[in-house]
Image (spheres, rainbow, N blue to C red):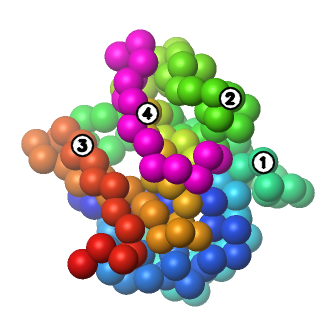
Amino acid sequence: MKILVVSDIHGSELFLEKAYLKEKPDAVWFLGDGIGDFIHARDYIFDGACETRAVLGNCDYGWSGEYVSEQIAAAGNAKFFLAHGHRHGVRNGIRDICIEAYAQGCGYALFGHTHCQERGTYFGVTALNPGTITRGDYLVIVFAGGKPEFTFKNLADS
């Protein structure tokens, strides 16, 4: 299984489309800020060809229903806590989001908000930020024997 993780589209749907076509993932997980762009991509670019998950960010005003600010996803032998990160103070570090992920029984926390690719561990939880797709940054997760392997990428990479 291959998962494309993106965050902070902010109107750069074309970059999301390029990452999707380049990676050909089985799933796309969106970590907030640009939910309208993500929904459009889900409906017209992905067109049901892959599983999608999305959480709301601090710029996603007025969305409700199927979209929430946090969710838990399972893939391979791993559990992931998905959040934009603004409610967990990620601009000041990963501690709070890792504690929340741990409390939810997750070994991994995926977040956005800072627009910077980042990986760190706190309280036994690995936290990863794909960066912002507006700069071509994203994260790919593949599974080897059920265990996730993470690769930070940029659209400029060959």
Q: At 63% from the left edge and 60% from the top edge, which residue is drawn?
A: 8
Q: Position of residue 108 (x, y in %)?
A: 40, 32
Q: Which mark is residue 148?
A: 3
Q: Which mark is residue 127?
A: 4
Measure the C-alpha gap from mark 2 to mark 1.
Answer: 12 Å
Where does label 2 land, which residue? 89
First in sequence, mark 3 or 1: give its number: 1
- Image quadrant containing the N terminus: bottom left
- What type is the residue that disc 1 sits on? Asn
- Distance from disc 4 to disc 3, alpha carbons, whole Å, reads 13 Å
The residue where tag 1 is placed is 58
Residue 124 belongs to the span the image colors magenta: yes
The dot on residue 71 is none
Q: Residues within 10 Å of mark 2 (few under 14, many from 20)?
A: some
| First to last magenta residue range | 113-126
151 is higher (above) or lower (below) than 36: above
Amino acid type, mark 4: Ala
Residue at the location (73% across, 32% down)?
Answer: 87
